[in-house]
Image (cartoon, helix red, strand yellow):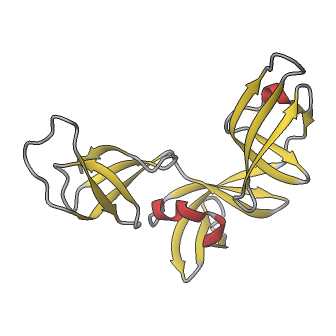
Amino acid sequence: MIETNELRKGRKVLIDKDPYTVVDSEHVKPGKGNAFSRIKLRNLKTGQLLERTFKSGERFAVPDIMSQDMQYLYSEDDLLTFMNCENYDQITINKKLIGDQFKFLSENMVVDMLFFEDKAINVELPFFVELAITYCEPGFKGDTAQGASKPVTLEGGHVCQGPLYLKEGDCLKIDTRTGDYVEKVNK
């Protein structure tokens, strides 16, 4: 059991028999009355966001979530196929389960698949991935005094802002948590 003051970003808790992960946590101490915490939670089964307030001292159960390294193999229609890296068993899940994170998946990528009650509920990607640029406007020299950027389309379909000097075929390091450009990768 964990208490309200232990709820930090990334912590997993069990609320109403569903596993949640803490997205944001704010401790509020009003002038009058008791202190409370305002918590944003993401349901690991459905991906739905929930914002709730909890009194100080409330207790939560920790869900029995198992993490397993899985290798992404391929997608077919709305289904994604992953392979267990240890025993080579294959699991097929629906694209809706991972939502927009699908744009960051590339073949043979190893991810952490979360299981709750022996059922795959979510996929945790690495914090950074390397993706190639499939389309971008040509860059222009100069006009960079203000840190200019341009939209760049990556191989999974994700669009982010990048520096003007980028061109098609370049490989970029992308933060999967925010979807932002980090740096150009030389291969």
Image quadrant assignment for residue 31: top right
Image quadrant assignment for residue 71: bottom right
Q: Is residue 153 above or below residue 11?
A: below
Query: Outermost residue toward the left?
Result: 141
21 relative position to 153: left or right:
right
The percent position of residue 14, horizontal first and vertical second, equals 86, 46
Q: Residue at x 34, y 62 (%)?
A: 154
Q: Residue at x 45, y 67 (%)?
A: 107
Q: Is residue 50 above or below residue 77?
A: above
Near-viewer residue (67 or 105): 105
Q: Residue at x 13, y 54 (%)?
A: 139
Query: Outermost residue toward the top?
Result: 31
Near-viewer residue (116 or 4): 4
Near-viewer residue (43 or 63): 43
From the image, which quarter does the N terminus lie in? top right
69 relative position to 41: left or right:
left
Q: Residue at x 76, y 51 (%)?
A: 66
Total marks drawn? 0
Q: Is residue 115 above or below residue 141?
A: below
The percent position of residue 102, horizontal first and vertical second, equals 52, 65
Near-viewer residue (47 or 71): 47
126 relative position to 38: left or right:
left
Query: Outermost residue toward the front?
Result: 32
The percent position of residue 33, horizontal first and vertical second, equals 90, 20
